[in-house]
């Protein structure tokens, strides 16, 4: 069995006060460090809940204002080959308030476009495109956006001991993801173990990417290491699409603060989200869609206020061949689509760029390693992940 094209199945998260119940038959497991009073499992198929230790919760005190007369404004954007939605609630009754929002929404658009032009692998002269085209060992000047995102990527790479690795570019392409090639249709179309082994070896040299700042200008140096695949010499290439969306959410949060907006949310491709306050309820009810639910049933719900959310899943882009699911999330230890049993991973809190990278890493870790990692390294954020096993 296989699909004809890559599938972007369903958004992983949405804001809602409603409860939905799953209709699938198989039972799944949920792992979370959220205290039991802080979430509700809504899908009867998720029966096995394992509590992860270590989360250090601290309540924030909010001075809520009178929101009588608040209305909602909405804007849609397209960047990094994905849609983004901006929702702001405020008092827009005056002309000045409307003009202020228009200026704010334009700043959001400018910010998204700037990040896209710096990080996109499809924009011809972006920093990352130029890096990918450069010879091994080359030094390139980059802008501050690229420098900041690469710095965060290297930090999370080290924190996760390589389970987050943005240098798996060739592996992603080899399995038909990344927008450049069609998905394999049969097992014969899958890349060979030899080829994947070489690409994975190359990606393991991501730690050799060097960053420098000199006199207010920013530089990146490409590793000298290369591999030979058939008659082609391959140097290291990067894809910062996932962490880039999180970085964009972090920057939009700064704009919310700059313009004084306290209420609303910003949703980037349903995988990275900023949730501010709700004008009536304070916190939002945030529902997460079961990664195996074709009817978009919610499996768990929690409340979120003034935090960022990132979710990765093997249901976002995938195909199935001979009963095996191949997704766009690559396991850096094998170089192949994840087969760890983890279906989805969510991080609530902290920076969105960091959370985006962390959810990818958790997908590749498997449940035992992910539990230990959360207990030791992620005590300041809420973690949820689901497993088939």
Image (cartoon, rainbow, N blue to C red):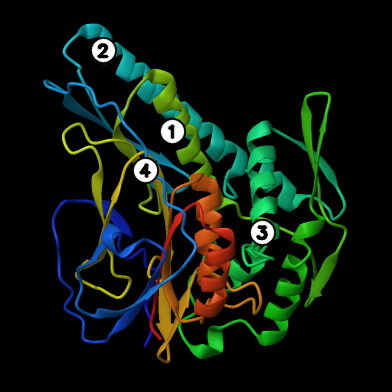
Q: Residue at x 26, y 12 (%)?
A: 97
Determine crowd level at label 1: few under 14, some 14-19, many 20+ residues with C-alpha closer than 10 A: many
Q: Is residue 204 left or right of residue 49?
A: right
Name the residue tied to disc 1. 253
Q: How many numbered callouts?
A: 4
> Which of the pair 75/343 is nearer the observer?
343
Name the residue tied to disc 2. 97
Q: Secondary structure at mark 3?
A: helix
Name the residue tied to disc 4. 59
How much space separates mark 1 and mark 2, taking CA atoms? 19 Å
Residue 226: image location, x then y, percent? 84, 66
Name which of mark 2 and mark 4 comes first in the sequence: 4
Q: Secondary structure at mark 2?
A: helix
Q: On screen, 327 above or below 99?
A: below
Name which of mark 1 and mark 2 comes first in the sequence: 2
Residue 386: image location, x then y, percent? 38, 73
- Location of residue 238 by image quarter: bottom right
How much space separates mark 2 and mark 4, taking CA atoms? 32 Å
* Residue 159, numbered label: 3
Name which of mark 3 and mark 1 comes first in the sequence: 3
- Pointers 3 and 4 in contact (C-beta within 8 Å): no
């Amino acid at each position: 069995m296989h699909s004809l094209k890559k599938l972007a199945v369903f958004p992983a998260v949405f804001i809602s006060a409603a409860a939905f119940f799953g209709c699938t038959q198989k039972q799944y497991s949920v792992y979370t460090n959220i205290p039991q009073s802080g979430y509700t499992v809504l899908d009867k198929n998720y029966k096995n809940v394992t509590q992860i230790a270590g989360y250090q919760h601290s309540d924030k005190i909010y001075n809520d204002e009178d929101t009588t007369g608040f209305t909602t404004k909405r804007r849609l954007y397209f960047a990094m080959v994905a849609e983004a939605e901006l929702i702001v609630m405020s008092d827009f009754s005056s002309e000045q308030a409307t003009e202020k929002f228009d200026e704010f929404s334009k700043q959001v658009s400018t910010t998204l476009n700037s990040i896209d032009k710096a990080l996109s692998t499809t924009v011809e002269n972006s920093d990352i495109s130029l890096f990918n085209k450069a010879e091994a060992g080359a030094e390139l000047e980059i802008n501050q956006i690229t420098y900041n995102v690469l710095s965060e990527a290297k930090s999370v790479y080290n924190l996760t001991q390589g389970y987050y690795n943005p240098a798996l570019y060739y592996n992603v392409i080899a399995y038909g993801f990344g927008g450049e090639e069609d998905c394999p249709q049969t097992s014969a179309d899958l890349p060979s173990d030899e080829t994947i082994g070489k690409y994975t070896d190359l990606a393991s040299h991501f730690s050799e990417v060097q960053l420098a700042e000199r006199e207010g200008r920013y530089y990146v140096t490409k590793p000298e290491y290369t591999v030979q695949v058939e008659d082609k010499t391959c140097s290291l290439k990067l894809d910062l699409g996932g962490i880039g969306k999180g970085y964009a959410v972090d920057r939009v949060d700064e704009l919310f603060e700059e313009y004084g907006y306290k209420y609303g949310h910003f949703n980037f491709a349903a995988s990275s989200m900023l949730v501010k306050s709700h004008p009536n309820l304070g916190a939002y009810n945030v529902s997460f869609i079961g990664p195996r639910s074709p009817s978009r049933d919610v499996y768990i719900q929690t409340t979120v206020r003034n935090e960022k959310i990132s979710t990765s899943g093997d249901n976002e882009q995938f195909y199935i061949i001979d009963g095996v699911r191949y997704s766009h999330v690559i396991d850096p230890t094998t170089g192949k689509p994840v087969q760890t049993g983890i279906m989805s991973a969510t991080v609530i809190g902290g920076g969105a760029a960091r959370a985006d990278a962390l959810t990818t890493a958790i997908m590749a870790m498997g449940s035992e390693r992910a539990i230990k990692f959360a207990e030791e390294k992620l005590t300041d954020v809420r973690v949820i992940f689901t497993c088939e096993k």
